[in-house]
Structures are given as C-alpha cells and as structure tokens.
Amino acid sequence: MNKFGLRPVMVDVSMSDENSVTPLKFGNVVMDHTTLVQVRVTAENNNGSRASGLGAIFLADLWAFPSKQAIHHQIQHAAMKQLVQLIAGNLLTYREPEHPIALFSRLEHDLPALAQEARELTGLDHQLPKLAQLVCASPFDAAMHDAYGKLLGRPVFAAYGADVPGNCVGDYLGKRFADRYFSDYIRSAPRLAVPIFHLVGGLDPIHPADMSADHRLPDLPGCLEHWIERDGLFCFKVKLTGKDLAWDLARLVDVALTAEACVRQSRYYLTVDLNEQAPDEQYCVELMERFREKSPAGYESLLYIEQPTDREAPGEMHELSKYKPVLADESLSSPEMIDEMRRLGWSGVALKTCKCQSHLLLSLAKATEYGTPYSIQDLTNPGLALLHSLLVGAWTNPVMGIEYNSRQFYPHVGLEVQRRHPAAFQVKDGMVSAASLYHPGLGTGFDQIPDAGRISSWTA
C-alpha cells in the first residue's frame, strides 16, 4: 500500500455549453461551440485526510475524432458527454489508495468498455477513438493530481520526486527509466512568465482590410496586426489547409511579413499546423522549399511543423524533418507511440493536458530522455484548463512557449478564474504570468468548481 496514495470518494461534474465569439477553423472543420466540463474529485489518503482537486476541459469532438467523421458531430459530442458521466461513477470503484498515475492506469484500462457503453447509450454507430476517450478522462486525471498535491501540501510539480513513492518512471516505462523520477524531467522551479503562441486560424484576418463586420468585436482586436499591437506578440501558430499549396504558401508569407513589420521584439517565431490535412510528406517538403525561397527570414523563424498527415496513417517524415522538426499531435495517443513516431522519422511530440496529466508526464519523460523537442498545446481551453496548461509550460522546457488561444475565441468563459488570476489572462509583451500558480496541487487555489453550471454528483 502506498502511504502517500489517495482514493476518490466523491465526484462532482459541471457541464456548460459555450459559444465562441468568432469561429475557429482548423483542418477541414470549423468549431463555434462546445461543452466545457469541470470536475471536482474529493480524495482521501490512508490517514483519512481529504482534499478536493479540480480539472476542466473542452469536449472538442471535432478534434478528438478524425475530421472525416465531422458530419457526426452532434452524436459524437453526445457520446463524449455520456462518457464523462460514466467515468465519474467508475472512479468511485477504485478503493485502494494509490499514486494518481496508478489510478489513471486503472481508468485507462476501463476506458474502452466505458466508451462502448457510452456509444450504445447514445446510438453512435462507430467507436470513440482513444483521443476522445482521453479528452473525457483528462479533467478527472487532472483533479486527482490536484488533490494529490493538496494532500501533500505542495505544488504537484514539486511532488514528483524520489521522496514520494510512485514517482519512479521505470515503474511505468520499463528498465531504461529504472533509476529516473519525474522530477528529473521538469524544472527545479517554475518560470514566472511564459511566452504564448497566438493562433492564426484559417478564417482569421491578417490585416485591417481583411476584416468584415463579424470581426469587429467589442474589446477584441479584429485582425493579426491589431493583436500584435495590443499584446506585444512574437510567437505565432499558423493553421494551413494541407490541400492548397498556393494558399498555404501565401498565408505563411503573409504572416511572416506581418510579423516582420509589426513585432516589437528583436525576433519573431512561427509554427505551422496542418491538422492531418497534407496528402503526404512531399507536399510539406515542397511547401518548405518554396517558403524558404519566398521568405528566407520567415523560414528561419519557423520552429516546427505539427501533425502534417493523417493520425491513423502518419507515414515517414525522414525527408521533411531535415528541413524543420516534425511534431506528432493527433497521432500521439499514448507514450508508447513516441517510439513508433521516432522510427518513422518524426522529430518530437505535442503535449496536451487534454491527453491527461498522467500521459503528459510519461510522454515528457520519454521525449526528454530521447532528447526530442516537445511543445505544449492547449485545445483552445479557457479558465482552469488554461491555467493547467500554463502550469505545465512553467515547470517544463517546451519549444519556446505554450499555445494560448482561448482569449481569441472564448474570452468570456471562466470569468471567476480570470478574476482570481488576472495576470495569467493578460498577455504582455507576448507573455503571460504564472506567478499566481503557487498554491498546492495544480496551483489555482480553487477547491470548488468556479462558474459552475448544473452539477451532478456521485458518492462512494
């Protein structure tokens, strides 16, 4: 028995439907609404002490399912909401106090059966993929890590060392990691400020002349030039089509020229995300060749290429990775996949809290041990979910910074969290502050679900 372990004894779930202020286009889908899930897990340790941990996530089925299944959006979304409720009840069957990652291993084992039940209850005629299952599980896993840190009385990233049983990475990843601990792969102290990547979506205006009435929103910049002016941005994530080489090239060059003209810092940085839409590696190789020719400075600023090809058939990237690092996102649904992607020539990984804190820690250990780059992406998450992603970025060493785009699409969501942590939601000189995330657990200081909608509860 792990004397530092914990077990869930009560689960509360809040769901609220949220509409974006402007549509987000990625790949071949457009997301303008989704459901925010917030959970509170009350956990107990061997001494009978209790703490409540919180977690939150957007149920972004349009990302979690392959885009070719987007026509089934409504029923897929319903199935994910159903799975959340099934996970809540299932958590209370874990009666033995354990480390949060050990508890997550149990949950991960149970997820396929729970997903099948959710599918049957909602009438979904195809499987919930592993990514969709992880998204549904992620707020519960986050809440367990939050409660774990609170029971230990320290920030959870300061609770992953050798002094606490269950933190040996070798217990989960094998003998190569036998003498390694999660603390070996994170910073000894968090950064107080983290650079953010601004998203340039497929529908987002670049210049004032590109703006329509729909883009003239109260209190929000309407185009990239105005965002740069307001927030002092210098890092940009550019969504591309993967289907129209001329458009993709023109878009990249336009963003690069805009950054060169408007960014106040001495340098700017780009990343590109094709969201699985490129037909093959050669499409991206040609794009890189032409981008380097058209915009040498823009090409020099490009840090990496994210998930260019289909998650289920990613293909080899040996040639493309000679140009820029190629990072796996949708193809990475388990830490074990990192080895396969490396074999195929992919350079690194995109870490997301929506794939679960436990998976993130294991993937972080592998990526760091292998010396491969990793990024921190955020699934457009607001409120508590954004703070979780920021906390990860503060305690780790990703490529440059973290993705942060909820302020572009869902700035009105999570207002109570924004009031508690204002500096984390105010971009200044292209960075946000993580200084307020010093509380035990995931650092937020919340013990109750903020801005809660209707709450459903389960008790052991």
Image (cartoon, grey):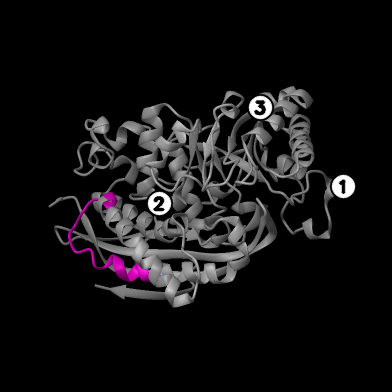
First to last magenta residue range: 85-101
Disc on the earlier residue, 2 or 1:
1
Q: Which amino acid type is marked by label 2?
A: Cys
**Relative to 147, is 273 above or below?**
above
- The foreground one among 57 and 192 is 57
Q: Is residue 99 magenta?
A: yes
Q: Quadrant of the C terminus?
A: bottom left
Q: Say what secondary structure mark 3 lies in.
A: helix
Q: Mark 1 falls on what kind of element? A: helix
Could you classify mark 1 by the number of other residues whose Cα lies within 10 Å: few (under 14), some (14-19), or many (20 or more)?
Answer: few
Q: Residue furthest right?
A: 209
Residues under labels 3 and 1: Cα distance?
A: 25 Å
Which secondary structure lies at badge 2?
A: loop
Q: What amino acid is at disc 3?
A: Ser
Query: Going 74% across and 40% down the picture, which residue do you hit?
Result: 248
Label disc, if present, on residue 356 of the rendered structure: 2
Are circles 2 and 3 on residues that touch, CB within 8 Å?
no
Residue at horizontal 46 percent and vertical 53 percent from the top: 354
From the viewer's perspective, is the residue at label 3 or at label 1 nearer? 3
> Residue 313: image x %, image y %?
53, 45
Residue that badge 3 annotates: 301
Q: Is residue 281 left or right of residue 244?
A: left
Residue 287, position in %: x, y? Answer: 71, 32
Q: Position of residue 396 (x, y in %)?
A: 42, 35
Residue 143 against residue 83 in the figure, above or below: above
Q: Is residue 37 magenta?
A: no
Numbered circle sitting on residue 209: 1
Residue 454 against residue 344 in the figure, above or below = below
